[in-house]
């Protein structure tokens, strides 16, 4: 077995963390399992580098709340020499250290995915695997919060494509989903998606619709979503804002 195939082997069921709600489930590999895999395969020949971070502060429930988002780079040795893949991550907490660690861990999962590490989480998630990080006595997040979290992305996507024709609307929604999750088709990358979506934005100008959604929903999302969910929505809004100056501001 080649080194590359070894690092891309599927993770064991107990290494998956999962939350399920309704007909949808979230499946992921915690960063410490990815680090263990990289150490086993590459020893000290891999690197994890922070490219940029931003920290935003606000007051929530009487405490200072930190939102950290940024880009990290995972570099692995190959026959051609060191090759890098980048991942973006975001997290929020009233503890700055925890927010930074959470954002870095989230970015590692996404950077690793571009190498095919843990890719099974996006292709065929393991069903019914309990989250090792979730205490059995901890109350689950409310269904309404989870539904609202998914609905937030749906509302933003619908606003973005509201002026498009039927065929373009369907394709643009698929592109938005890949852009939001960092899941690309073979031969596709983030820059190509940004270029395609920028063309849609320039041609159909969704500024007013996106501004309307933001003004109506942002305070509700902040109040009703969990901190990490709210940070996820803000991160996506910032990604949309990259597509065209003034498209959406956070």
Image: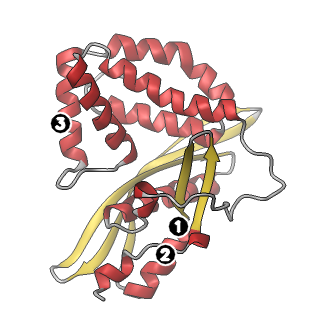
Name the residue that disc number 3 marks.
195
The label number, if any, that marks residue 246 in the structure image: none
Residue 48, image x, y percentages: 40, 70
Sequence order check, earlier mark of 1 and 3: 1
Residue 225, image x, y percentages: 64, 32
Name the residue that disc number 1 marks.
31
Is 188 left or right of 225, judged from the image as shown?
left
- Asked if labels 2 and 1 touch by Cβ distance under 8 angstroms, the answer is yes
The label number, if any, that marks residue 35 in the structure image: 2
From what the image shows, is residue 122 above or below residue 76? Answer: above
| Quadrant housing the N terminus | bottom left
Residue 210 occupies quadrant: top left
- Furthest toward the right, the residue is 137
Please tell me whether mark 3 sits on a helix, a strand or a loop. Answer: helix
The alpha-carbon separation of the residues under discs 1 and 2 comes to: 6 Å
Kindly identify the residue that appears in the image at 42 percent across and 55 percent down.
Answer: 122
Callout count: 3
Residue 91 seen by the camera? yes
From what the image shows, is residue 211 above or below residue 80? Answer: above
């Amino acid at each position: 077995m080649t080194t590359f195939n070894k690092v891309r082997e599927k993770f064991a069921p107990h290494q998956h963390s999962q939350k399920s709600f309704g007909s949808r489930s979230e499946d992921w590999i915690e960063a410490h399992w990815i680090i263990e895999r990289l150490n086993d395969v590459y020893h000290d020949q891999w690197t994890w580098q922070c490219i940029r971070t931003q920290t935003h502060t606000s007051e929530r429930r009487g405490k200072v709340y930190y939102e950290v988002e940024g880009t990290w780079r995972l570099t692995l040795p190959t026959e051609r020499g060191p090759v890098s893949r980048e991942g973006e991550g975001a997290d929020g907490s009233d503890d700055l250290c925890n927010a930074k660690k959470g954002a870095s861990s989230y970015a590692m999962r996404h950077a690793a995915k571009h190498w095919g590490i843990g890719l099974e989480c996006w292709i065929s998630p393991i069903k019914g695997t309990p989250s090792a990080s979730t205490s059995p006595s901890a109350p689950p997040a409310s269904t309404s919060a989870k539904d609202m979290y998914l609905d937030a992305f749906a509302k933003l996507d619908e606003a973005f494509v509201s002026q498009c024709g039927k065929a373009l609307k369907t394709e643009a929604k698929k592109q938005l989903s890949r852009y939001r999750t960092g899941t690309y088709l073979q031969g596709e990358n983030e820059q190509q998606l940004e270029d395609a979506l920028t063309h849609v934005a320039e041609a159909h100008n969704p500024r007013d619709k996106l501004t309307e959604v933001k003004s109506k929903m942002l305070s509700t999302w902040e109040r009703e979503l969990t901190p990490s969910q709210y940070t996820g929505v803000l991160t996506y809004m910032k990604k949309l804002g990259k597509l065209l100056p003034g498209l959406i501001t956070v």
